[in-house]
Amino acid sequence: MSAKAGLFSLDGELLCEAKFKTKKCDGVECTVSSLVELAKSLAEQANVDFSKVVAVGMGVPGVVNSEDGIVLRWTNFGWNDAPVAKLFSEFSGKPTYIANDANVAALGEAKFGATKKYQSSILLTIGTGIGGGIVFDGKLIEGFKSAGAELGHITIREGNDGLTCACGRKGCYEKYASATALIRQTRHAMVEDLDSALWQVADGKIENVDGRTAFIAARSGDETAKKVIDQFVGYLSEGIADFVNILRPEAIVLGGGIANEGETLFEPLRKAVDARTYIAMDIVPLKIVGAKLGSKAGIYGAFTIARDKIKE
Ligand SMILES: [Zn+2]
């Protein structure tokens, strides 16, 4: 398991950060105690006495109830009802607050990153699947026991021809608009068009295709690549339009490697979303932007949940 950690001043300045590979550990107590050791070593690196640390915030994968700090389920580690926040607090002597890692990243981006000037935003992280989080009035919208905001699992394809998702449903958003989906769509287009510039970008090998391949070929003017991007933007905008119709945030932030594609992505995406939302952007504005903090969004968000809790 890898973990990222940051030590912040109370006014939000990142003093020191580090990335760790934690050793393989049996059970929640062992994992948490190794995380406490990591926190202590980070303070040491920053030359800050650990006794001066006021509180700890953490983003944890899985179903994480941020109210009571219990990880209800994390299948990778086989955790059920694991009292992670309580254990960390016992082992470290610090008040500890946790939330789901995708939600924490959304909060970090909302407070310190791309959307810090907006009161409401939705982060969509486009990766292997689609993760993300919803922030309104500076607070996460997580649902009952923090089990909501599973943004990748709305359906955008109806009926039995939808692709089957790991969650058991057919036609889920992330089966069409994740980076994994884009790679699949790119490969499919290459097989259909052996003359496409996509082949050059991929050095003639279909296994070299990644999330950037279609964007690079589209920028060189390749028509097949442009069609791949058009189709992908269509899928991506279907989900965004749903979130906008229900919640109407001021901004949508896209995270993941795709955020670096700039206007090749964002210009058509804004048009596609505007064409699909019930209330158009000339009536109520909507920003669609790329994330800024990258993999640091999580530590900024973890800092934010801890700071906001101790302020209460
Ligand atoms: Zn699903």
Image (tube, grey):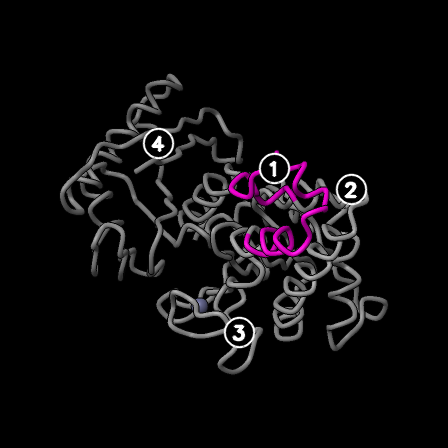
First reached walking from the N terminus: tag 4 or tag 2: 4
Picture disc at residue 219: 2
Residue at image point 66% right, 37% down? 201
Residue 78 on the magenta segment: no
Specify start and end residues of the magenta stretch as a single range: 184-213
First reached walking from the N terminus: tag 2 or tag 1: 1
As helix, strand or loop, the secondary structure at mark 1 comes to: loop
Name the residue that disc number 4 marks: 53
Residue 18 location, x and y as percent? Answer: 40, 26
Nearest the viewer among 197 and 44 is 197
For this orientation, the residue located farthest to the front is: 194
Residue type for callout 2:
Arg
* Crowd rating for badge 2 (residues with CA inside 10 Å; few <14, some 14–19, many 20+): few
* Crowd rating for badge 4 (residues with CA inside 10 Å; few <14, some 14–19, many 20+): some
Give the mark toward the camera: 2 or 1. Answer: 1
Name the residue that disc number 3 marks: 155
Residue 52, above or below 204: above
First reached walking from the N terminus: tag 3 or tag 1: 3
Name the residue that disc number 1 marks: 204
